Image (cartoon, rainbow, N blue to C red):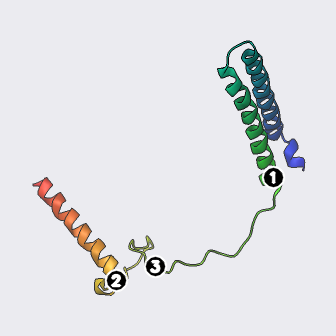
């Protein structure tokens, strides 16, 4: 709870209150203009309080995220698909037979075609 009283958080609290209050004041101003005969202002009179609600929702969400303990769940399972890009780890690359993986073979053909095009443009 003390985290929410740090200078950064106090500034965020003040900013949220000022922004929400400003949006509500602008909504009231547009409502008064709508009553004076400007029909479009009624739409804005509903829009500004919506912005204020969104600001307050996001402010609450930030507070919730700050106070929530960090999640320490299980590690993500390894992917079942074979990677087409080799690991950047040093050492010799494992030999993969393209005939075992048609997707890898198609990707290698595509790379060979791109390389051939690049060679033609360099000449």
Foreground residue among 91 and 97: 97
Q: In this view, does 82 lie above or below 31?
A: below
Question: Which residue lies under the disc numbered 2?
Answer: 101
- The Cα–Cα distance between marks 3 and 1, rounded to whole angstroms, is 37 Å
In primary-sequence order, the first of circles 2 and 1 is 1
SS at badge 1: helix
Question: Which residue lies under the disc numbered 3?
Answer: 81
Foreground residue among 75 and 20: 20
Mark 3 touches mark 1? (CB < 8 Å):
no
Q: Where is residue 8 in the image (x, y as percent from the top left)?
A: 79, 39
The quadrant holding residue 85 is bottom left
SS at badge 2: loop
Q: Residue at 79% x, 22% y: name it.
A: 28
Please tell me how crowded label 2 is: few (under 14), some (14-19), or many (20+) other residues with Cα within 10 Å. Answer: few
Q: Quadrant of the C terminus?
A: bottom left
The quadrant holding residue 27 is top right
Q: Residue at 21% x, 69% y: name it.
A: 112
Q: In this view, does 73 lie above or below 98?
A: above
- The Cα–Cα distance between marks 2 and 1, rounded to whole angstroms, is 47 Å
Q: Residue 64 carries which label?
A: 1
In primary-sequence order, the first of circles 2 and 3 is 3
SS at badge 3: loop
Q: Residue at 88% x, 42% y: name it.
A: 5
- The Cα–Cα distance between marks 2 and 3, rounded to whole angstroms, is 11 Å
> Does residue 41 appear left or right of residue 77 in this picture?
right
């Amino acid at each position: 709870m003390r985290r929410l009283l740090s200078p950064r958080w106090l500034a965020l609290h003040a900013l949220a209150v000022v922004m929400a209050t400003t949006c509500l004041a602008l909504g009231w101003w547009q409502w008064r203009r709508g009553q004076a005969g400007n029909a479009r202002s009624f739409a804005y009179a509903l829009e500004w309080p919506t912005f204020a609600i969104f600001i307050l929702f996001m402010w609450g969400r930030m507070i919730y995220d700050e106070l929530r303990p960090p999640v320490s769940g299980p590690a993500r399972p390894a992917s079942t698909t074979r990677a087409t890009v080799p690991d950047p780890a040093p050492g010799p690359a494992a030999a993969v037979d393209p005939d075992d993986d048609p997707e890898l073979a198609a990707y290698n053909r595509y790379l060979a075609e791109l390389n051939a095009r690049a060679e033609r443009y360099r000449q």
